[in-house]
Amino acid sequence: MKRLPIVVVWSIAFAYVESSLVEYLRAIYYPLENGGFRFPVITLDGLKAMGDEHVRRLAIEFGREIATLLMLGAVGLAAARNRREAWAHFMIAFGVWDIFYYVWLKAFIGWPESLMTWDLLFLVPVPWVSPVLAPVLISIAMIAAGTIVLHWEARGQPLQARWVDWLMISSGGAIVIVAFCWDYRNIMDGGIPNPFPWLIFGLGLSLSAATFVRVMMRARED
């Protein structure tokens, strides 16, 4: 728990860097004087029509997203004494970074207008889209889970997840990703987002959360 404040400060600062870069990209492709970021987004064909520079910038953006995940994972490993703490710090770092990404963008350009504003979350391997509320809920759940894991570690009673627990938690996460990517073909074709599949999203989040609670309750009984 001693390293947690450092991880949180790092995540807030990293979110500032990410938000700054996104503000620059939006100034290029979605300037505020033209209404700012909105759907439909620019398609790959649209970028090609604009020139090779813009296609190259998309490739760089793919790499940046992967590098972001690697950096979040690296800070988790750097702050941890074991694999459980590494996962916990990663989840907290990811959650804080994601929430403050929106906080900083709100401060910079007044976006998003609300938690129900649609966002393009990731591009790898296909576009992820949802209202801002969905990733914020995931981030809150990750922060809570990571903090609980570190709390039990500090007590000297680490949470022990069985292979079936990991399977259920991973399955829940995969279902959430499916919800985010549900409309990817439409988005890639330059369409307006269809209604977000909240039922699928809720199923995935509930499955992971319920499994984590079961692990925690089992630890209480031991």
Image (spheres, grey):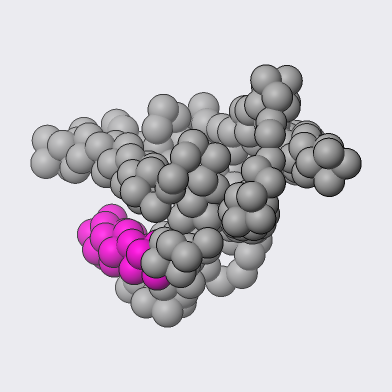
Q: Residue at x 68, y 34 (%)?
A: 160
Question: In the image, is residue 211 part of the stretch drawn in magenta?
Answer: no
- Please state, as top left, top right, bottom left or bottom right, where the C terminus lies in the image: top right
Q: Residue at x 28, y 41 (%)?
A: 67
Whether residue 30 can be seen here: yes
Residue sitting at the far front:
156
Residue 81 placed where, x, y %? 44, 45
Residue 204: percent from left, percent from top: 73, 35
Residue at x 79% of width, y 41% of height: 219
Res 201 → quadrant: top right
Q: Position of residue 190 (x, y in %)?
A: 45, 38
Write the start and end of the magenta stretch as one range: 9-30
Residue 32 percent location from the top left of the image: 35, 71
- Position of 131 compared to 32: left or right? right
Q: Tell how many labels.
A: 0
> In the drawing, does residue 186 fall left or right of residue 67?
right
Q: Is residue 14 above or below residue 138?
A: below
Which residue is at the far right? Answer: 221
Of residues 68 and 36, the one nearer the viewer is 68
Is residue 10 in the magenta section? Answer: yes
Magenta portion: prevailing SS class: helix
Front-lying residue, 221 or 48: 221
Q: Nearer the viewer, residue 86 or 219?
A: 219
